[in-house]
Amino acid sequence: MRLIRAVSAELSKCLTLPGGRAGIAVAMLGSIALTVLNAMTARRALASGQPELIASASPFETAFAAMPLGTVGAVVLGVIAIGSEYTPNSPDAGGGRQIGTTLTALPQRIGLLSAKAVAVVLLVVGIAAVTLPVSIGVARLIVGEFAVESVSVAEAVVRCLGGTLYWTLTGLMALAITTLTRSATVPLIVLIMNNSLVSFSLLLTNLTSLAHWLPDLAGRRLFTGIDTVDGGLDAVPGAWVMAAWTVALLLVAGAVLRRRDA
Amino acid sequence: MIDIEQLVKRHGARTVLDRVGFQAAPGRVTAFLGPNGAGKSSTLRILVGLDRADGGHALVAGRRYSELAAPLRTVGSMLDGSGAHRSRTARAHLAWVARSNGIGGHRIAEVLDRVGLTDHARARVGSYSLGMGQRLGLAAALLGEPEVLVLDEPVNGLDPEGIRWIRGLLRGHADAGGTVLLSSHLMSEVAGLADDIVMIAGGRIVASGPLDEVTSGYADLEDAFFALTDAEASR
Amino acid sequence: MTAPGLGSAVAAELDKLRTLPAMLLALAGTIVAGAALGSAFAAAAVAGRVALTATEATLATVPYLQAGMLVVGAWPFTHEYAGSQIRSTLAAMPRRPRLLVAKTIATLVAAGLTAAGTVAVTWAAGAITLRAHGIPEGDVGLGSLVGAVGYLLLMGLLAAGVALLVHHLVPTLVTTLSVVMIASPLLAAQSEHARWLPDRAAQQLYAATDAVLTPGTGSLVALGWVMAIGGIAALRFVRRDA
């Protein structure tokens, strides 16, 4: 009961912040917009008989290529969920930060972090539930009669679920890391970059194969779309490794939050 | 009822609070006085669970703050201004606070009206003046209709009308049987309002008791304040 | 006494940046990251028995280092809104167009120093790592190194333009990082029109691979983006209440 109240407060916080809304918009509208652009390109290439110009004639792959923008949205939500607590208010309005109000309303700090984690999961899963079907539908509609679907329905469902899991775990890691840093800048840079093609983790694989056990690379096969490097963990053990990282980071964040003066 | 005993807080080698103890009783307004940096805010932050004590305890209604199931229904507090994110509206801020403690949504409009922010409820908190931020902080404190009010420098930034209003509000709360603990460094504001005085200087309690007891032998509260806090400072 | 001119406005802006710990941290962080990455790329090439010059190692680090440049470019235009400093600034320098020019010059100086310093340190770290393995650092190829400095500078300016528009660091970073790091490569994989994106166009400065854009026209396209975003933001800054 108490957790439900706390989660609903956290959801309300996130949805009334411009930053939270922006995170949702990036994930949903950004992914869909990118899908539209890519699908239009694909249609033109296929219609003019030049399929070699595009990566894939499959509408599913075309839509799935926009997955990394959803990851950015999940990162933003995770970062905002705790980072906004530490944003100083305008000095004219008396300064101060929201964290004081939050902790007087919910003094059990582990409960607070759990509520934030649940809120992030609900938001990210909700975003995925809307974004993925809409993107795939839009791609099918645009590519239309030129489409060559190479991905079976079963495979598509599995990959959508895998992608959603990846988004969710990334959002939770963003939450945990920002709890530790209390500032949004560094987690945003590191997490957004690591989900791009110029990822620090990917670079590290050149130096040591242990880097494949880093959370983002371990979970990479959850949405195989981009196979940039060979090797590393398979999807299922990779998912477990990424989940273990997430849980470990959340535990550290919880322990620190519990001990720290607000 | 607020019960603080033997509270100790250290920041590194510096002792911020040195065995601080006092009580604030129901039906009375207790003023917590001391110069800047004396330990007023530290004490109040520990009382509402924001900071951890290195020793002693601070109890509200006989329990530690973090043990209260819906704390805002027992204790309303305002520390550090509005305590709201600058990008949120006052209404949205109060909405999540209410939700977190299972407080009915109808209270939002009521407290906004009570503190005189109804016309500004849909403005971003970042655009508020100091006084408006203070009023929003009070609104959040009053939201759960708590028995105990803990307010850090509540008159900061309020205009004369606002100061008069908050005096009436706190007096009324105590007269209805509530407990009020407020910190201040403004003697004139406190003299007309407080029933009990607790004075702190250099992290130690230097005087506590009913107003007339603490001020007896001195011309007024201000005189007593300087005599008692200077004595501690020169130790 | 003469009235203070643009020179003192620029000096004041540079003073602000010089005394802002977060700015120094971003600057130092970018340079240190450059050294680490330059060394890492060289070491990876040595381990993989791939021939690589120090300059090639440096150019490979540029996509990573641009993140630091985004922060360096964004700070000058966002830090004053984190408190009420913007009011002191406008009280001291009420002529807003001149204030903007001064800020832009100060940002150019700061971003230019960061970019040049980073590229130099990155190259040196790559060269030292190669030498440590008894491999010569190879041709310097000054042109592409200067191009890399230019690219990093343009990315700093892009962030500055977005920052002037949105006033706060976090949304600036989310926007620019998403466009440069995520959206741009995704679009480039699908469509040749991606070459008109600011980062793709500016890349011609150090890696002239495009069929249409040259280093000259590429940097002009990128500059066009900066001017368009910055221009709208500047107009708003000059006209609107602070």
Image: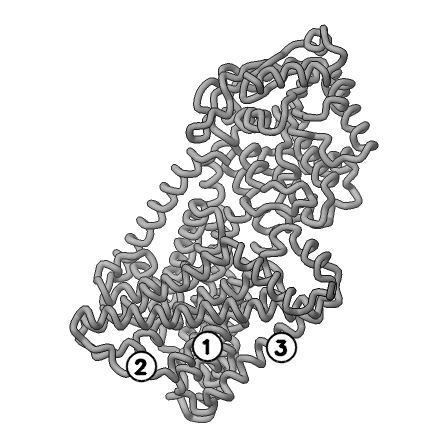
Q: Amino acid at mark 2?
A: Val
Cα–Cα gap, marks 3 and 1: 18 Å
For residue C107, side relative to residue B31 (left or right): left
Which secondary structure lies at badge 1? Answer: helix
Pick whichever of labels 3 and 1 is earlier in the sequence: 1
Give residue B171's quadrant in the image.
top right
Q: Residues within 10 Å of mark 2 (few under 14, many from 20)?
A: some
Residue A204 pos. (x, y %): 28, 63
Q: Nearer the viewer, mark 3 or mark 1?
A: 1
Q: Amino acid at mark 1?
A: Tyr
Q: Between B90 and A259, which is closer to the camera in this rendering?
A: A259
Query: What residue do we see at 63% from left, 12% from top?
Result: B208
Query: What residue do we see at 46% from left, 93% from top?
Result: A48
* Label 3 sits on residue: C228
Query: What residue do we see at 73% from left, 10% from top?
Result: B218
Q: Amino acid at mark 3?
A: Ala
Residue B20 visible at all: yes
Query: What residue do we see at 36% from left, 66% from top?
Result: C34
* Label 2 sits on residue: C140
- Position of residue A83 relative to residue B24, above or below, is below
Could you say which disc has been placed on residue C151 in the image?
Answer: 1
For residue B40, side relative to residue A251 (left or right): right
